[in-house]
C-alpha cells in the first residue's frame, strides 16, 4: 500500500506526471506514491519522467480502463 495516492483519471498527459511531480516534491526518501490514470501512454510517460530522477517505479499495471503506477523516492 502506498503512502500517498493521486487520482489522475481522465486527465490528459502531461497532467498526471505534473500532479505527481508536485506531490513528490513534498515527500521523503522511501515514501511511495500511487498514481491512477486513464490517459494513453501514461505508464510510458512515467518511465520517461523517472529515468533521470531519484524516483523508481516499484510497479505498474494496466487494466482494461485504467493504469496504476507506484513510485518511490530513492533519496532526496
Image (cartoon, rainbow, N blue to C red):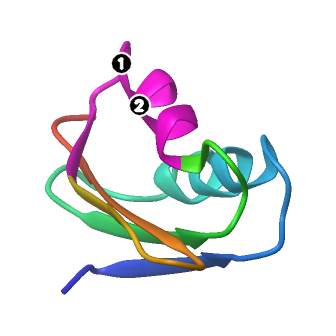
Mark 2 is surrounded, within 10 Å at the Cα level, by few (under 14), some (14 to 19) or many (20 or more) other residues, namely some
Mark 1 — residue? 51
> Where residue 48 appears, x then y in whole percent?
48, 22
Along the line of sight, the residue nearer the viewer: 32 or 76: 32
Quadrant location of residue 33?
bottom left
Contact between labelled residues 1 and 2, with CB atoms less than 8 Å apart: yes
Identity of the residue furthest to the front in this view: 64
Image spot of residue 20 (x, y percent): 58, 55
Q: Quadrant of the C terminus?
A: top left
Residue hosting label 2: 47
* Distance from Cα at disc 2 to Cα at disc 1: 6 Å
Report the magenta residues as a range: 43-58
In the picture provided, is 69 more to the left or to the right than 40? left
The residue that appears at 18% across and 86% down in the rendered structure is 1
**Residue at x 57%, y 34% (from the top left corner):** 45
Q: Secondary structure at mark 1?
A: loop
Q: Nearer the viewer, residue 22 or 14?
A: 14
Residue 64: image location, x then y, percent: 51, 78
Amino acid at each position: 500500500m502506498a503512502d500517498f495516492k493521486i487520482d489522475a483519471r481522465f486527465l490528459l498527459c502531461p497532467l498526471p506526471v505534473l500532479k505527481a511531480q508536485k506531490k513528490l516534491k513534498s515527500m521523503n526518501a522511501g515514501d511511495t506514491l500511487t498514481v491512477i490514470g486513464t490517459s494513453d501512454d501514461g505508464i510510458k510517460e512515467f518511465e520517461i519522467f523517472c529515468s533521470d530522477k531519484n524516483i523508481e517505479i516499484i510497479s505498474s499495471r494496466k487494466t482494461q480502463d485504467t493504469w496504476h503506477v507506484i513510485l518511490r523516492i530513492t533519496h532526496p
